[in-house]
Amino acid sequence: MFQRILVANRGEIALRIIRACREMGIETVAVFSEADRGAHYLDLADEKYCIGPAAATDSYLMIKRIISTAEIGNVQAIHPGYGFLAENAHFAEVCRDCNIEFIGPPHKAMAELGDKVSAREIAMKAKVHVVPGSDGLIADEKTALEVASRIGYPVLIKATAGGGGKGMRVAMNDMALKAGLKSASAEAEKAFSNAGVYLEKYVENPRHVEVQILADNHGQVVHLWERDCSLQRRHQKLVEESPAPNLPLSVREDICKAAVRLVKAAGYTNAGTCEFLVDADHQFYFIEVNARIQVEHPVSESVTGIDLIQQQIRVAAGEKLDFKQRSIPCNGSSIEIRINAEDPAQNFRPCPGTITKLRVPGGPGVRFDSHVHEGYTIGPWYDSMIGKLIVHRKTREESLACLRRALDEFVIEGVKTTIPLLRKIVSHSAFIEGQVDTTFVERTW
Ligand code: ADP
């Protein structure tokens, strides 16, 4: 097992990794930008190093600074968290070339699955349904129009390198398709330095269901059941839960098995997530793989009792998974909500500022994963997440009651937050009945 790990991230996920390591008796080296200097969570690491100014491109995304810190800190492995360098296959390769284990998948599998077009090809080979769409990238306008007339409008233009909803456009007709191709491609080039786009049939009012996977380096691949992440705003998740409500066990099992097939076909190891859309008839379609730990991993930890970060570290150290698929339970119901420093009344504009008062809920069934504290300043530099509130109870009804109670206890002053909107969401009849799809938030508010 590793003795020391560098945590190449910040905020709540850096703290989550530091905590997992501490429980395993592994020392941690934290890195921080000048904007994060003084944040309390850094004190929980064994060592910490400043790696540059606030701008992520000059600090958290600077591979050479992270690698030199890993050498100075004398670590055997790097955990990338999510975001920043987590899905950068080049970074994973550089780490391993420097004899530092990258806690994540092999860089080749990451590159193949990180690209949505090649991930679709692997899925098709593994006999996993994909959304009907173009065969590979769209070469020109003429091909796009032909594909659209074959699959029928509405269609979705998607960036092959996409993430965070960037480079995605819905088109209802030929004219919108032509304009959308240009703007999606330009946006993708700017965000990912890759202008490649492809077409998918736009699935109307789908649910988003994803499967948590764990695979070791000895050929064992298991799933940790599914998460329903249908509650989104502009294709960004707000609420996630496990198990998916109102989805028959046979469908859930089929989706999970499809995910395992796909991951095996890709030669993927470590933790990952296969995302699917599920239509009104419970037909499911693969959309993409996230080759990293995800923000919403705690709901899977709650229902299975498996610590995903610790498992990632064990797998990277070459250990075998010490459980089999049949012994992974899906106990009770777990729901996570993301609390962001944003103003829902101002179109969710980020609201940087200092937290002047903080009262965090607790009690049975409540977990709060966050790095913030009273006096903490949320800067304009990184994402606006304050923390994740996770509940876990025996039934969904009890989880909902626990969530409402916990949200009532929450006090955050000094910055605007999404809590008022989340309170409305968790009290809405459609959510209580487990009847929301990915368009619910936009349609309702
Ligand atoms: P990104 O990587 O940019 O987050 P994803 O492929 O994960 O993009 O899709 C994000 C969200 O966009 C999905 O959860 C879903 O709400 C929506 N979406 C993606 N593909 C489709 C599709 N073919 N039809 C309808 N909605 C889609």
Image (cartoon, helix red, strand yellow):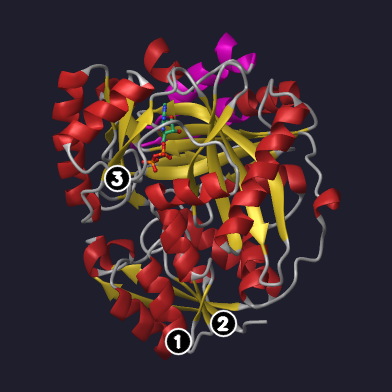
Residue 205 vertical placement versus 142 (above, below): above
Tell me the mark number nearer the camera, choosing from 3 and 2. Answer: 3
- In magenta, the rendered stretch is 406-433
Pick the front one: 276 or 360 = 276
Q: Which residue is mark 2?
A: 4
Mark 1 / mark 2, whichever is N-terminal: 2
Ligand 1 neighbours mark 1 (CB distance < 8 Å): no
Point out residue 232 in the picture as x, y percentages from the top left corner.
Answer: 44, 28
On-image quarter of the N terminus = bottom right
Q: Amino acid at mark 2?
A: Arg
Q: Residue at x 42, y 89 (%)?
A: 71
Callout count: 3
- Within 10 angstroms of label 1, few (less than 14), some, or many (20 or more) residues? some
Q: Which residue is mark 3?
A: 137
Point out residue 345 in the picture as x, y percentages from the top left corner.
Answer: 29, 21
- 430 drawn magenta: yes
Tell me the mark number nearer the camera, choosing from 1 and 3. Answer: 3
Q: Which residue is mark 1?
A: 73
Mark 1 / mark 3, whichever is N-terminal: 1
Pick the front one: 222 or 430 = 222
Residue 144 vertical placement versus 138 (above, below): above
Mark 3 / mark 2, whichever is N-terminal: 2
Q: Are marks 1 and 2 in contact (CB under 8 Å)?
A: yes
